[in-house]
Amino acid sequence: MKKHRHRILGAVLFVLYLVLLTYFLFFAEEMGRSPDARAEYSYNLTLFKEIRRFLLYRNILGWRAVFLNIFGNVLAFMPFGFFLPVIWVRTRHWYITVLLSFAMSLLVETMQLVGKVGSFDVDDLLLNTIGGFAGYIIFILARGVWERYSGTNRK
């Protein structure tokens, strides 16, 4: 019964996360998502190009831009990797969660390209997938702590 409640709570939090992610990626003006910014297609197909640019020109671009671009992409997908195995037992294999994190990131990047909101960036695919994997690692650690101190077994 407790596991069922945990899954329901996880599903509610996962849906809330997806709503917030959608808002920040497609509508938040503070993230540069104003109607004026939708003028043209923008994309990067060279791995590490934007990461390198943000690191090399961090003093010119500012630390906020560096943090949002590099760490923001990782942090944005950590809840995806954390909540997915909570609500769907099949994703408790790390490679499935990583694959689904990549697929979700590819969907988001493609929607940004087609909708002319933000840009399609292979660096974002990498960073988002790393974030999904990091969220999965946190799930595994949290589950281990939970099982150790609550006396429950896996699954």
Image: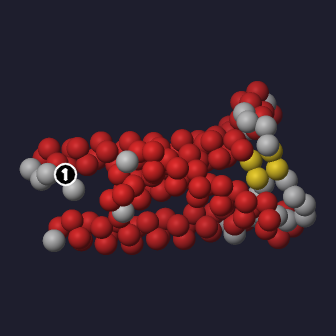
Q: Quadrant of residue 10?
A: bottom left
Asked whether, in this view, residue 93 is left or right of residue 121, the answer is left
Residue farthest along the top direction in this orientation: 56
- Please name the residue that numbered disc 1 is placed on: 154
Point 39% across, 72% down: residue = 12
Q: Quadrant of the C terminus?
A: bottom left
Residue 128, x across and y down, in percent: 58, 47
**Is residue 129 visible to us here?**
yes
Applied colour scheme: secondary structure
Q: Quadrant of residue 141?
A: top left
SS state under label 1: loop
Residue farthest along the left direction in this orientation: 151
Point 31% across, 45% down: residue = 140
Residue 127, x across and y down, in percent: 61, 42
Amino acid carrying label 1: it is Arg
Q: Quadrant of the N terminus?
A: bottom left
Q: Is residue 21 above or below residue 106?
A: below
Asked whether, in this view, residue 48 is left or right of residue 6, the answer is right
Point 13% across, 47% down: residue = 149
- Closer to the camera, 104 or 71? 104
Q: How many marks?
A: 1
Asked whether, in this view, residue 141 is left or right of residue 13, the answer is left
What is the crowding at mark 1: few (fewer than 14 residues within 10 Å), some, or many (at least 20)?
few
Residue farthest along the right direction in this orientation: 39
Asked whether, in this view, residue 130 is left or right of residue 34, the answer is left
Residue 48, x across and y down, in percent: 72, 33
**Is residue 68 visible to us here?**
no
Residue 105, x across and y down, in percent: 62, 54
